[in-house]
Image (spheres, coloured by chain):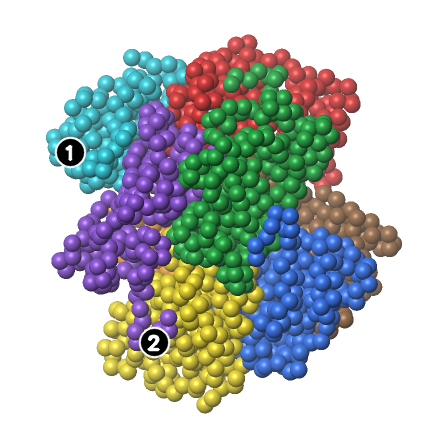
Chain colours: A blue, B yellow, C green, D purple, E orange, F brown, G red, H cyan
């Protein structure tokens, strides 16, 4: 759209997204001022749409909530949700983490899946350094149609999991770790180089992206329940 | 397995894979001598199993073929196949390339999918520099349950495609290109940073890996036809 | 110039620049103290010259303004301008962004072009993940003599645009994004590896640099109107 | 285009390019077999089109020439040309190199410009380590409408040149050099970080790309003479 | 040692090493001509010393053997040995590999340990993608005093093993793999970032280095039997 | 372990670790809130276990201490310890640093070793730029069964030390330094490339990791005294 | 030196340095607490030694000064000096900068040279983008026995200068710049790849290091005047 | 110099260099054909100039020699010399290597110094892993006015040497080594990060560059004897 000097937009909202993609509207919260985020939520609310914002901090949440909108905030996953009618996705998605420090990314993923109508089974802190933890839950993990494996440091979890299940595994490297390969680089490279088949990778800390991939899979696999 | 000094293995063959994963046996051909590869194919043939070898050059093919085994060789995708009974996967997978130089990787992917019983629709040389090429086929691409987008250089194809379809997109960066970011690094980084939702990434030139991811989806999606 | 120990300069001002290059004076604001920037602006004002400072924050602006100088400040593009007589450049420059987060860099570019006497058409938030947005404005983009394409994340916009226009495209990677290839590295590599012809690249977030390249073209293109 | 299994294309030729972009057809020769390149040239010849292939080695040239086609080969710039009617571009492009080892890239650029109808002034081996060489020719360089500066090693030539001219400078890093930052990385980074205004950069060794950028500029600047 | 122009050494041999370090003499064979290597072996033989050369190819071996020296060559580990009296180290070292392609590095390690008088238990092709392979041998691995874990690709083997044993684990990344993080970089980074305790890392493909570390550990642990 | 939405764990405590590995429990303090750390310490105290937390800042320490637990805090090594009965390890571990800025990492290592029951000899600020400092203490260093060499900048200390002792050397690169290779990258690469035999490396600043490696050796070396 | 647990040093002071190296004592101030720095200065003052601390901020300066010591502080070069008797070095050192942002590094260098008794000629803001600035002072630069060239961004100044003088050139890359190659990486690589002879390089922002290199030359060059 | 299309130069020879810089002419041999190198040597011979070519292989040498020119070839240092009258430089330069594999780079340096009239003392294979080797020659090294320290792998030699001498140390990283940081990157980073004062660095394997730096120092230090 042509933009004049005096009406610079800070976000081109996408009101037809649900029709086009089948999923609800979403907004990337990081970098937006509390006022901008509030304005976006009010606009969706006025149209009767639900909306999910990711990477929302408590200051942004306070601003939106203070307007009286009925939003829900998950501080662990940093998700702010204006709820609406959800079409249920059939099937189930397992979300695993290697350690406890990976949980915020996993909750961004899990909360997004739930916003899109998917069912999530969480298996946290099952990293490869203590294999008994993973082996203790693997029978339940195998029931999932898609597995999201979230891990930082050496990023070995997706490789080990993928050898134990027959579902596709979406690997999410996290920025957990330090030193050489810090910021998730070691984990991301390890996941791209997985010796196990059936693993594909999203960007570092991109729990939201993994959720969309997993839900697109589920929808094609199982269809949508209204 | 415990390995004695005098019987060093060059490959631990996996005869129960089909039962465990539902897919046929596969072997990574690169780095194996013609004799080693021949030995592997004969072992599978004796057991009546089918097998697929990837990254096979013509010298390796000649060695295996000269033993009288009924193998098929695809020089473009560098695949060597000992055929067997295949269970058909329901659904369809679209395989796209940005340019013609990406075709070997795409054929490694497509041939592997076909070995696993999947149906492939090929859309080659539809890169983003000439958008009319992609837009001319997009209606057919939309029919696929999974889209594999193979591209080198700036690796923009998955981002553009993912915005135009509702299926999951598996992105395969290729080592096509030169200069800064050569060897597929620029393409891989671009795909991990895709601004479009629904994209996950496998390793550079890993057409085989994309095929496994896509087929795992398909199998979960639709069930398996025998 | 020989500099004595006790008169260390903090900026060697260039008063003959306009004569030498045809463009007005410019200053890089980042890293200068409010006092230093004020002193520079007063010096130019005393000589009756216009001047543009880039990367100026509000604290610096307040300091300069408080001296009574008739400056104009654009907080989005972080530009501070002491206006003067401008010679109009013929032709037109289109400035595009992939997303809304790229707008500050785009406004740095657009405001600089306008300071140099060029005419700008803005097309913001037309990234490749939603191709309909770009295709909806492409006929207007084609009218420009130079196209500046500003994008972060996977940096695909210049490649797609360059395939749709016949003007030169100046690509500006931005530091928008996170994870692997963050800080603009993924975008910069992608733009250097563009499969589309006609693209050249400036440094990450360097909206000012793109403006100078574009204006040098325009001046040579059409001559300068006084 | 939909591609069947048995008619895998090795190049989707673009016969309407001249109409669309105003420039003649071009082909990237590297990686194509002599037979493939011959086939492409024959196809263009049958349609009466001119065509330029870049990165052509002598073996490929011998194959094409042996068919009797009236091609011209420049071994320094590795260009193979099937000549045709050329529309002259007004104006002039200066092509500079830092050293003699940069000449192949510069000739790829210069020969491409000439194929597109542009006029080239060559200034080779005028690197910054011996400034008298550059200063001795700078008056002639200033006459050009666009300057292409080709340099490896520390890549300082574009910065120095851009401070001495008022035209846009297209910088081409080359892979000349060794050790830290080898393969053109040091030169490319230096050019992106140029302290001089008016510089934009193409990929390492991409003489062809610089030619297209420069010719797009010229055409917009001056129009095309028929 | 002061070296005159005309007697440039190609190797300063170290005849007192065994006394100083307790281990036999070793030579890095890569980059040495067959004549140089032969000369070195003859010098040690004349003094009645044993010696081990690593990274020896078959051409070098042929040259040394043709002199009549009683050497032993291991083509898999690329080790050439002039045997001598060996003092036995007490205890045992387990050497594991992730895949079959890692075996040459593992044999360089195992053969070096045996040259130093250590006892090796080999466990090859027990990578994490098929966890049953590792779990099937883990009880035997636990008996070792030091574990050397050799792996390429994502390099996850040391992390998983270290969580299952109480001995120190020496991790050897190998250059097996391709694409992003190729050449062993992904594996090396993963091993340095291991979430499991007790892992330390040597250079990529440095089987010899791991052997020295492991034997130094053993000697201190158990003392040396003469 | 299966984790429900409403009981997200922030740490899966490992109460059987001492039995499994022979060492006391440890916790990574960085990133945990004071409340979380306090809760963890109280849980261990209730069970009568000792515990060591690494990377603990003074705010975290204050919180834990204010509960009345008898903890000990080492601000230099950032270690917080709830003491318990310790089984003495035989032997001795030397901990060296190149400079004074490396001491916090060295104290993390030394304090951890002492928590595990090992005996530490400290040799700080003995870097290679002043060789007399190292040579003055080398006879005492030689008495150690394991040497931990901690160094930043060019990371040369482990190479020099390893040539002077016959024990295994665990190298710890630190993030001390600046400029090219900052953050410990130069030191880590140098240590992996050590020309001296007997060196293995842990992650940058990972004093804790080096302690575990060294103690695993010691325990195997001499047996454990209760 | 052997360090007991309870007397951990924070700096091993070197009181014999002047005798050993001929230069005064120096201390790296960054990372030291005001108390630590004060303690160091008092120790030197009590012994009647002069001392130079680099990277000293104003808070550290205030602490040292408040003790009544007669120190001198240069806030631009961040140098804190306890003056003493200086032996004059013969000859002269030229210190150049590309821009004004490089001046702090240049003053760290110049002030250190002066502390060591050397004579400095300063030539600031003579970068290659405006060559007339450098050419205007080059005759004076040529008089120096050593040239220190300090530059960020593309780091071209040492290459250009070295071609114009016959003295050795010590290149100091600075962290001035942004985007690709930021933090001084682009400048450092460019300087290592200089096409001009006679250039050697120190670490990024290491003005102190360049001063030591230059003064070591001077002392050998001309002898030392007492 | 203006270069016409048909007289593309392959090298702009510099016949006044000796007058300008005081040193003889030099040519970079790598990448030049035997014919080109022969032509260059004949041109210098006809003018009665001496000339040094670096990186010359035996095929190039054979071509030049076969013309009857009285050249001298050093295969270790890959130097080809057409001798002439040499002005002696006073003073002495020590050239050290860490290992034997660094000798080719060291001989390139030493031979270039001798061509320029300097006196060289060689100390090879004195790397830090066996410190007794270095300490055994250090008294002779201290006599040199400049020290060139050549080392690959971890590149620690310059740091250790610089702490033992008072002359400036020119560090030359070599590409000796493998694995992480291979190609000289680890050594170059280590040398830039040297904790020892007085070290400056040239590019990887750039023995020639170190020679020019050292000779420029010597000439300024001591002047030139005719």
Name, please, the residue furthest toward the bottom: B226
Q: Which residue is mark 1?
A: H65
Q: Chain letter for mark 2, please.
A: D
Q: Nearer the viewer, mark 1 or mark 2?
A: 2
Q: Secondary structure at mark 1?
A: helix
Residue G179, above or below D10: above
Image height check: is E156 above or below H35? Answer: below
Q: Position of residue D190 (x, y in %)?
A: 45, 39
Provide the residue designation for mark 2.
D4
The image quadrant of residue D162 is top left
Residue reaching furthest to the front: C226
Q: Are marks 1 and 2 on the same chain?
A: no
Instruction: Indicate the position of residue D48 as horizontal and vertical percent values.
Output: 21, 59
Residue C218 shows up from this direction? yes
Please name whichever residue, H78 or G200, is drawn nearer the observer in this view of the structure. Answer: G200
Left or right of C35? Residue B158 is left
Height in image: B76 above or below B143? above
- Report whether C13 appears left or right of C58: left
């Amino acid at each position: 759209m042509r933009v004049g000097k005096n009406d610079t937009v800070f976000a081109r909202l996408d009101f037809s997204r649900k029709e086009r993609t089948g999923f609800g509207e979403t907004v990337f919260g990081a970098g937006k001022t509390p006022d901008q985020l509030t304005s976006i939520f009010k606009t969706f609310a006025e149209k009767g749409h639900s909306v999910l914002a990711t990477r929302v901090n408590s200051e942004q949440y306070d601003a939106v909530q203070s307007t009286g909108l009925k939003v829900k905030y998950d501080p662990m996953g940093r998700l702010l949700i204006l709820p609406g009618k959800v079409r249920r996705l059939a099937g189930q998605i397992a979300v695993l983490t290697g350690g406890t420090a990976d949980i915020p990314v996993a909750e961004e993923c899990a909360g997004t899946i739930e916003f899109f109508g998917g069912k999530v089974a969480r298996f946290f802190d099952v990293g490869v350094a203590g294999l008994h933890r993973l082996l203790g839950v693997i029978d339940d993990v195998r029931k999932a149609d898609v597995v999201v494996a979230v891990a930082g440091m050496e990023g070995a979890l997706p490789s080990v999991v993928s050898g134990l299940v027959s579902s596709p595994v979406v690997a999410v490297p996290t920025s957990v770790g330090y030193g050489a390969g810090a910021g998730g680089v070691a984990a991301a490279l390890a996941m791209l180089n997985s010796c196990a088949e059936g693993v594909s990778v999203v960007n570092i800390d991109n729990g939201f992206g993994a959720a969309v991939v997993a839900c697109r899979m589920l929808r094609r696999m199982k269809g949508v329940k209204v």
